Image (spheres, rainbow, N blue to C red):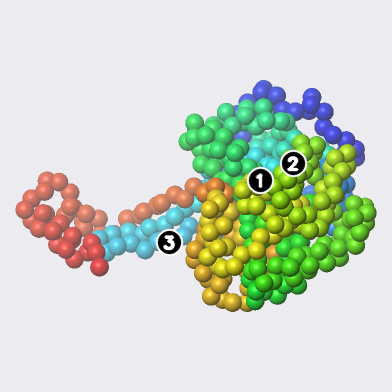
Amino acid sequence: MSTSASPPSSFASADDIERVFAAQRAHAPAVRATSADQRKDKLRRLCDGLRTYRTEFQDAIHADFRKAPAEVDLTELKPLLDEAQFAIAHLDEWMAPTRRSSPVFFTGTRSEIHYEPKGVALILAPWNYPLTLTLAPLISAIAAGNCVTLKPSEKTPHTNVVLKKLIGELYEEREVALLTGAKEVAQGLLEQPYDHVYFTGSPRVGRLVMTAAADHLASVTLELGGKSPAVVDETADLDLAAQRIAWSKFTNAGQTCIAPDYVLVDAPVHDALVARLIDTIEQFYGATAALRRASDDYARLIDDGHVDRVVGMLEDAVAAGATVAFGGQTNAETRYVSPTILTDVPLDTSVMQKEIFGPLLPIIPVSTVDEALGIINERPNPLSMYLFSQRDTTVETILGRTTAGSTCVNEGFLHYANPNLPFGGAGHSGIGRGHGEAGFRAFSNERSVLRRRYGASLVQAVLPPFTNRKESFLAALLRYFSGP
């Protein structure tokens, strides 16, 4: 099929938005009643569809990013297939009511939590991983029994063509619909009273989404960004640290919300780490600037505006005194910014104040753990953190004195792909959790259910009128059953 860009005429209209929402609202009770087996079937169809369209997605994402097919498999298709298979394997367990214990005064009752779908959900996805960040929340929403509207970013038109075809073939629109468009479409969708909104993107837009959701008292999951630090101390395996940092940073040309945004390294091993990072980048993408520019394994930035922003941050850092220790080559016409390592970076420059979301990596020497902690904690809570150390006390100190959505110790960004681990931010970097059971819970209402089985007469002792005898009974309750 053709993977040409979607013309503006294919964008959803206001009528489309209202029609889809009304159809899903009307159909939500039927979807709510679906069994675990029916939901699993929907997820199996999604897995089959992803495999069927694998080549088309590879071609489409290459057209949008020039991303390597193997990188598409590793960062887009495999995480989705793993997520869906994990949900299929555990859905019966997730849907089952869970028992809760009861205090002595509740003798004769049984307490449970039932997990019911929230109803109609809206998923607003970003452009940097157009498959994973659109369909992973969909997997959770389907597992929880919701109707879902998907709105992918308009910045990936080739991918959206294939996505729209996939979703249209797999699901009825009243159950799962995909609507394309720019910010006007997103705004129109947010005007509808969805029960849950799942947004992945920048903190700036996250605030707008949360404000709009508040008008309908809708719950939200916000997966945002921020400056995710890597910390390397003098005990670290520098070869491992350099490999994992370079891999996590330069995959997708740095356009990853959990990419290391800067590195804090013990001053005595600063130069050695920089040298190993340079060696690693050359191994990954080529030993010369020309080879790296021609590498089929290195992606491009998403659009001209993003190129201008990243190049502007690079120029600002250099003007302030930063040194380009490696890379620094750019080509606006091809949207190319090379893997770049910066040293001697002032902390007040934009690359150390704002999320980079591109292939620039500042390396900052520090003399003590406290100095590293000061730099981390004077910035908003990051989405992820990477610690490289063989000293457990250092790792535990940093874990105990910082806050982050997730942390990897002596590893790169593998944590995102583990469906057993909840994923999300902390404050500025996000609200709520996704993936695996946490994603199922995000799209579910936890309904408390208390059942009286026997002993109803026990409650009579606390019902009006409050006689002296009842007051004495209540006093005994407070004295013996209301505390340690």
Label 1 vs label 3, nearer the camera: 1
Dot 3 alpha-carbon crowd within 10 angstroms: few under 14, some 14 to 19, many 20 or more: few
State the image coordinates of residue 378 (x, y, percent, origin top left). Answer: 53, 53
Residue at mark 1: 350
Q: What residue type is labelled 1?
A: Ser
Dot 2 alpha-carbon crowd within 10 angstroms: few under 14, some 14 to 19, many 20 or more: some
Query: At 87% across and 59% down in the image, what residue appears?
Result: 285
Compared to 84, does 234 lie above or below?
below
Residue at mark 2: 312
**Quadrant of the image occupied by residue 222:** top right
Q: Earlier in the sequence, mark 1 or mark 3?
A: 3
Relative depth, front residue between 223 and 174: 223
Q: Is mark 2 on a helix, strand or loop?
A: helix
Relative depth, front residue between 123 and 273: 273
Residue at mark 3: 99
330 displayed left or right of 16 = right
The quarter in which the N terminus is drawn is top right
Relative depth, front residue between 74 and 290: 290
Compared to 219, does 393 lie above or below?
below
Q: Which of marks 2 and 1 is nearer the N terminus?
A: 2
Taking the view exactly as shown, the residue that stands out farthest to the top is 15
Q: Are marks 2 and 1 in contact (CB under 8 Å)?
A: yes
Query: At 71% across and 39% down in the image, what residue appears?
Result: 152
- Between the C-alphas of marks 3 and 2, the distance is 56 Å
Q: Earlier in the sequence, mark 3 or mark 2?
A: 3
Q: Which amino acid does label 2 sit on?
A: Gly
**Quadrant of the image occupied by residue 278:** bottom right
